Amino acid sequence: MTPTRRKFLTALPIAGAGVLGVSFWRILHNMNDGSFDPRAVNNPHVGRPIPTFSLPGIIGQGDGFSDHDLRAQTRPVLINFFASWCIPCVQEMPGLRAISRKIPIWGIAYEDKPENADAFIKRDGSPYERLAADRHGKTAIDWGVTGVPESFLIIPGGRIIWHGSAALDPQTFENEVLPRLAKVGL
């Protein structure tokens, strides 16, 4: 091995450790000043019109809804993707019931058996004004859903202005959703 190659091989791990150190420092610095949120999920649909879809209802819970129904709304609507098999969905239900007194919530059962979704909704009282079933999860893919529960704030005309990728609670609603409604004058 030549002396030049030996020096290069010796310097390589030191340079790699330096690059990693600087990268970690930048991440921690940006987390500290609030410019980086490691829990944030980038959804390219925020700011865009809702995807085209038409979903059937859940047996015993109405006829379902489509993008046309959402676009025809004259008030903001929260869309909540949920499933009966999802533990965080169970945990967010009390919060959703409280939020439903302030804004209509339309639910979409994600990859759920109709009988299980119906029992889930009836168990503790439904926060949903309207319900639909996405049995195979294809509509959720079009919305950019990565897991349940996830919620979207839709303004009249059918544009998405907020996306939450965790269980929604009243505090998150007050801190994240209401300011966005105020920003668009609603």
Image: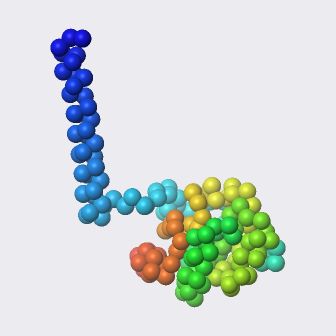
Residue 43, position as x, y percentages in the image: 50, 58
Q: Is residue 134 visible?
A: no
Q: Nearer the viewer, residue 31 or 107?
A: 31
Q: Looking at the image, which residue sits at the far bottom?
A: 101
Q: Is residue 129 above or below residue 107?
A: below
Q: Residue at x 58, y 67 (%)?
A: 149
- Compared with 142, 88 (above or below) is below
Query: Residue 27: x percent and y percent?
Result: 29, 53
**Residue at screen point 58% across, 83% down:** 94
Q: Nearer the viewer, residue 157 or 146?
A: 146
Q: Residue 27 vs residue 103: left or right?
A: left
The image position of residue 56, as x and y in percent, is 78, 67
Camera-nearest residue between 18 and 130: 18
Quadrant location of residue 184?
bottom left
Q: How many marks?
A: 0
- Res. 92 image quadrant: bottom right
Quadrant holding the N terminus:
top left
- In this rendering, does residue 49 appear at all? yes
Up-down: is 13 above or below 170? above
> Of all residues shown, which one is farthest toward the top?
2
Which residue lies at the image location 25% right of the left edge and 51% below the top edge?
26
Residue 114 point in image, percent of width and height: 79, 69
How are the colours assigned in the image? Answer: rainbow
Q: Which residue is at a point 48% across and 78% down the rendered structure image?
A: 173
